[in-house]
Image (cartoon, rainbow, N blue to C red):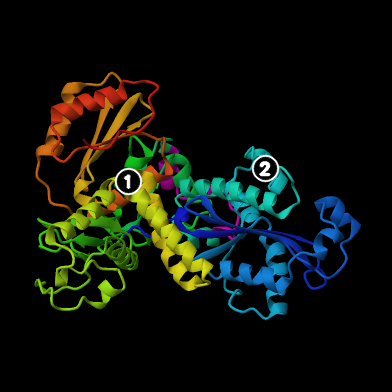
Amino acid sequence: MITSTLWDARYIVVDVETTGSDPTRHRIIEIACLVVEDGAVTERFVSLVNPHQPIPRSITELTGITNSMLVSAPEETEVFSRVAHLLTLPDAVFVAHNAAFDWKFLLNTFRRLGYSGTEAVPRLCTYRLARRLLPSTVRRKGLDGLIAYFDIPVSGRHRAEPDAQATVHILRHLLQYAIDRGIDTPLDLLRLQYAPFRRLRETLPKRLLHRLQMLPSNPGVYSFYDRRGRLLYVGKARNLGNRVRSHFSGDTPLCFRLPKHRIWNVLWEETPTELSALLREVELIWQGQPLANTVGRELETYAFVRLTLSEPFPRLCLTTELPDGGNEWLGPLPSHVLAAHLQQLLQRWYRLRPCTGELRNAPAEPACLYAALATCSAPCNGTTPALDYRQQALYLLQDATYNVHRWTQALFETIKQYAERWAFEQAAALRPLWRFLHRWAKSRLPLCLQACSFLLCIPTSLHRWELTCVISGSFRGAYLVSISFDRTGVRRFLTDCLERPRKLSWLDVAHLDVLSRWLAQNPHGGRLLLLPTAPSPEDVTEQLAELLLQPNHLSMGGQPQ
């Protein structure tokens, strides 16, 4: 299974302004906490704090914060109860530039106020990351230096919110640098900030040095093998040469999992685009089960929500089985927990029955508890006729196909209501599902698996298009077509994709997950053509030609007709 990536983590980006540099004697006078999920700021908490001690003139000159501004500011207990809640959310990672300074002040404040549970929060320092990820030509890696290097617009420096916002921008850039180096998980990123500095070993065997010099600068996948020919590690790269050589410089997570002396040989395979490298990497990891890979070795842990349209009164079921006839599958969802949350929410939103037994029309009997709670339309006692009830299920299926964004908005309102009632645990439990639905809505793909048929067209560096075809969630292959658009070759490729029967596999599910993530993170990286239920190769070829032969047309394809 493809587990949480760097973009899926919850980063709490923090910046503080203080009365001095000693965390035991001085106090925080302003704090900003920006919650970053899926690369976007989803929550923002900024507040002044009454320190009950005078502010030195040097601090006022630097920040513009005066004693009079803090007289009526909130007390520490009011401010830091909110900060402690944010830092103890599931999977939260504390982020700051020069994190040691901010964290020492926070930790001393928490201890003084008697808060517990914050000591174990993972901490990420963007200054340390910049030293290990950015090229040596970037000499100034302080906040001002990186603001200039990344050309980040900032107004009001040395105040908590502008500095925290600048750190968010820096974090986004550094995450992309880390992904380019093959860093997959937040745990690997946390380890990287403390990795030692090393240069490429000149003491490597000549055999390996020769192989490293042969590496191209194109996208692709690469594999490390030991002396016995056993597969040790598989990775993908935007630039094969830079990526593979970085493994031998000691600044990537591979050095924590695989001693370099075990690597006997390096093989690689070039791909037209980075996306095809991602798809090929999933295949090689699943097929070869390399020893050092921790992500992608198991694929059967995805889950679905099944809508049983084959029944007179359809219901929603949590399932880990692949699709069969007569029903509709919603997903794939990355975990069983997310699928269970989605099942419960959809049952309530569309008032579908949660019971599993056979229903009989018994109007004389009282409705069940779910009907009394208005979470079920009570088909059991005839309150809702069979046709009306089935229409509720079809509305759900229509939203899953064309309007996942509606679910994202509804779930956001549910989380907001929980938070307003101080039910923070319930709100935190639903946040991962909101992030998943938000990402899927950004990908513009149907969440109904059987309706998920599309062509994705990505320009390559060789003046060609790479066409990736998915039919009903099944990855059918890729094809390279010239800019001039060879209709005969494209029609032959589409005929093979559309007319060849193929059973959905777990590898197809993993491919679909990769494609949805790529589309969400690269909204303008290609052109997307959603396909109707029974597409004709000839009609699709003409639609594709119309889409690709418009030189300045970068918008995505429309809904299926």
Q: Residue at x 26, y 47 (%)?
A: 401
| Label 1 or label 2, whichever comes before in sequence order | 2
Residue 203 magenta: yes
Above or below, 514 relative to 529: below
Which residue bears the numbered disc 1? 515
Q: 457 or 421, which lies in front?
A: 421
Using the numbered discs, state the Cα–Cα distance from disc 1 to disc 2 in whole angstroms. Answer: 32 Å
Above or below, 418 relative to 199: below
Q: Is mark 2 on a helix, strand or loop?
A: helix
Q: Residue at x 28, y 53 (%)?
A: 510
Q: Residue furthest top?
A: 484
In percent of width and height, residue 346 lies at: 29, 62
In percent of width and height, residue 266 lies at: 37, 48
Q: 33 or 477, which lies in front?
A: 33
Which residue bears the numbered disc 2? 147
Q: 419 or 463, which lies in front?
A: 419
Q: 97 or 261, which lies in front?
A: 97
Mark 1: which amino acid? Leu
Q: Name the quarter where the N terminus is drawn.
A: bottom left
In percent of width and height, residue 244 lies at: 44, 46
Residue 201 magenta: yes
- For residue 234, say whether it is visible: no
Q: Give the range drawn in magenta.
A: 192-213
